[in-house]
Amino acid sequence: MAPDIGRRLRRGATSGAVVAAAVAALAASQAPEAIQPTTDNSGGDRAVGAGDTAPPSGVGSATGDSPYYTELPPLKTPNKPGKPGTSVNLPVIMGPAEAGIPASVLSAYKRAEQSIRSTDPGCNLPWQLLAGIGKVESGQARGGRVDANGTTTSPILGPALNGVGFANISDTDGGAYDGDKVHDRAVGPMQFIPSTWATWGQDANGDGKKDPNNIYDAAQAAGLYLCANDRNLALRADLDRAILSYNRSTEYLNTVLSWFEYYKRGTHQVPDGTGVLPVDRSDDRRPGGFPSPTAPFLPAPTSPSPTSPAPKPGTQNPKPAEPSKPGTTKPPTVPTKPPTTDPTPPTTPAGKVATLAVAANGKLTATTDSDFAKTPRVAALDASGKPVSKVSVRFEIVGATDTRFAGGKTAVTATTTAAGIASSPALRAGEKTGAFTIRATVVGRSLGAADFAVTVTERQADTLVRVGDDPLSAATGTAFDQQVQVKATDKSALAPGVRVTAQIVTSKTAEGASTEGPTFKSTSSRTATLTTATDGTLTLKAGDLLAGDKKGTYYLKLTAPGGGTLFVELDVTEPDTTPTPEPTGSGTPEATPSPSTSPSPSTSPSSSSAAPTASSSSATPKD
């Protein structure tokens, strides 16, 4: 994890493998990383050998190599009825003790799964994975030793990360979580270090605090961390990466997976404080003589028996109590029915809610591609009608729509205020119009939902005005070479993003588009949909309208939602067929007779005999 959850490398020999060299936590400001599994066929962690370079202290392990439990589940799996892959709550007597999970701890795991599946369904987080990690990290919160609110009865702390057998991580929280102002320690049932908790900490039980020692808060944070980097835990590769991001140890991976599969085959609920504590921690056989920090990591609960007080110094052991007479001792009570199926403890804020009601904005309306002016608000009330604070409420968009909450989400979670009110984040309408529902529910409860009716309508313009009044004319077979620009307004304000219907009609009273005349170049038809720009204008450029092949007067009709209508006259004319006269000038052949019809006397010798002269026909006396 990258400011991150209890990730630890095992030190010493376990299962015959030499363990990886120590690495330390990433900076809290970094995002969690996806860690590739090491190639290891020996069943243990990969060693740092010759040629390898160990990561510098403080890089790579969120808990600085703090220890974890290495005990594996029993070979005999739970005898679980039902379909494979499902889990049920069985009475204690119907399953092995190791399959029992304390009630509050089991509730926290299931509640975290339900919450995260509602906000990140693509992660496919199974609660059994949280149970496997919780078993390995803290033995299910030391066998479920938690109070009614889910907080451990005493802190669960790892050893000081002072560089002696572990990473060297200086204090980051001023001792607020781990009580150590010199070095950091892993904290709580899921073993977060303070820098990790600063990034991933949650308030899942609604008490107003993000407490790593609270099983509800810690389980929710662990689930969110495992789902980081868009992981899909239904895929084995992503599942392995998620576990290894918690602890870079292949043996840790194998141990968690063993418990994960064990719990998937069946489990049952046991009373808080009665869970089976595991043994054999990863630091039990550390080389170098480093002491095993058993007491700081998992301090054993001290519950002296009221009937067996400890003997005073210097006195003999007290006399054993005489056995009870036959028939006077009541047999232990064996539960015969499964516990309640509601995973929410009645002492939590969610458990107090009797009604979730619409507080305001039951009907919401917005136009396309715009923000809703208001958002859904609900009130969480108890049985007496009083408000309940710190309740997690899930708001979900239901129906076919592209409207989204802030961040592009379809589901979000909010917490009720002291007045019992929860409001969703901002809503933004998409491009799709129509009606749908926003549903509010209490996280972890099966109470009736509060529904909000939501409608998205088209953006409107009540006025369309042409910019400029130049006549529009084109000959048949050509395109209009003039631009058409229109300004759209709604209540005198510019109207951007309005979808305007454009039609070619034969008159201002015609019904429907014309069957002849001009067409839109973009659609090759006489109908088109145009959208106003951010400044509220709509533009048809020169050449966007084709004149068609029949002359006449037509109209471009523009209609906008909200009532805006405009007619622009289009004049289509016949092409000009008048011939163009050819140019004239001196030396034109038309002024010179053709040689074939007007021969020159100098080139036609017979011309003198072809036409008698005037003297040959005159009456001249003969000599």
Image (cartoon, rainbow, N blue to C red):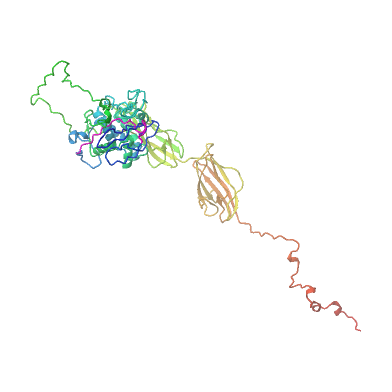
- Foreground residue among 301 and 88: 301
- Residue 202 in the magenta stretch? The answer is no
Is residue 102 found left or right of 323 in the rendered image?
Answer: right
| Position of residue 512 measured from the top left corner of the image (x, y, whole percent) | 50, 50
The residue furthest bottom is 623
Q: Where is 47 relative to 315, above or below?
A: below
Residue 246, quarter of picture:
top left
The quarter of the image holding the N terminus is top left
The picture quadrant where one finds residue 431 is: top left
- Numbered-mark total: 0
Residue 193, can we see it?
Answer: yes
The x and y percentages for residue 470 are 61, 46
Q: Nearer the viewer, residue 164 or 295?
A: 164
**Quarter residue 78 falls in:** top left
Seen from the viewer's position, the closer of residues 20 and 151 is 20
Whether residue 449 is visible here, answered yes or no, is no
Rendered location of residue 419, percent (x, y): 36, 26
In this rendering, the answer to whether 456 lies above or below 599 is above
Instruction: Point out the residue furthest to the top here.
Output: 314
| 144 to the left or right of 621 | left
Name the outermost residue toward the front: 50
In the rendered image, the residue lying farthest to the left is: 326
What secondary structure prevails in the magenta region? Answer: loop
Q: Locate the C terminus and report the quarter of the image it occupies.
A: bottom right
Residue 589 in the figure: left or right of residue 620:
left
The residue stretch that appears in magenta? 53-75
Is 70 contained in the magenta span? yes
Image position, residue 36 (x, y; %): 34, 40
